[in-house]
Image (spheres, rainbow, N blue to C red):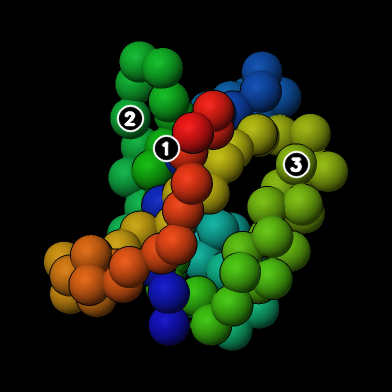
Amino acid sequence: MARYLYIVNYTPQGAGGILKDGGTARRAAAQAAIESVGATLVSFDFAFGSDDAYIIVDSPSPEAIVAVSLTVAASGGAAGRAVPLLSPEQLDAAAKLTPSYQPPGS
């Protein structure tokens, strides 16, 4: 499975829901959505500052991540972005590849 970091920012409507129902209810709802597409919730942490929550997910496919992202965005309660994460071993494997590339203007 591939690992993703989902960075969440709540709308005023979403923040109101968290004030009403609490953080553990939000984590449970996120976990249910993630598991419904065959993925696994690794961690769910609230934050403050420029982002409201960080969620790490193990997903069987990018399509599963997109499905959850679209559902969350359509709800109007939050907006977010998914960032694919690579293990150190995956980075090692990528560094061993030698793509053929010509820079612009050369």
Inspect the image, locate mark 2, and give the three-letter code of the amino acid beneath it: Ala
Inspect this view and state whether residue 32 appears. Answer: no
Q: Quadrant of the N terminus?
A: bottom left
The number of callouts visible is 3
Identified at 44% across, 62% down, the residue is 100
Identified at 33% across, 68% down, the residue is 98
Answer with the quarter of the image where residue 14 lies: top right
Which residue position is annotated with label 1?
53
Identified at 33% across, 30% down, the residue is 47
Inspect this view and state whether residue 49 appears. Answer: yes
Look at the picture and state if 105 lies above or below 75: above
Q: Is residue 46 left or right of residue 73?
A: left
Look at the picture and state if 71 lies above or below 87: above
Inspect the image, locate mark 3, and give the three-letter code of the amino acid beneath it: Ala
Residue 5 is situated, as x and y percent measured from the top left of the image, at 41, 52
> What SS does tag 1 mark?
strand
The residue lying toward the viewer, choosing from 55 and 66, is 66
CA separation, marks 2 and 3?
19 Å
Answer with the quarter of the image where residue 13 lies: top right
Which circle marks residue 47 in the picture? 2
Residue 76 is situated, as x and y percent measured from the top left of the image, at 79, 34
Which residue position is annotated with label 3?
73
In primary-sequence order, the first of circles 2 and 1 is 2
CA separation, marks 2 and 1?
5 Å
Residue 89 is situated, as x and y percent measured from the top left of the image, at 17, 74
> What SS does tag 3 mark?
helix
CA neighbours of label 3 inside 10 A, class few (<14), some (14 to 19), many (20+): few
Residue 17 is situated, as x and y percent measured from the top left of the image, at 63, 33
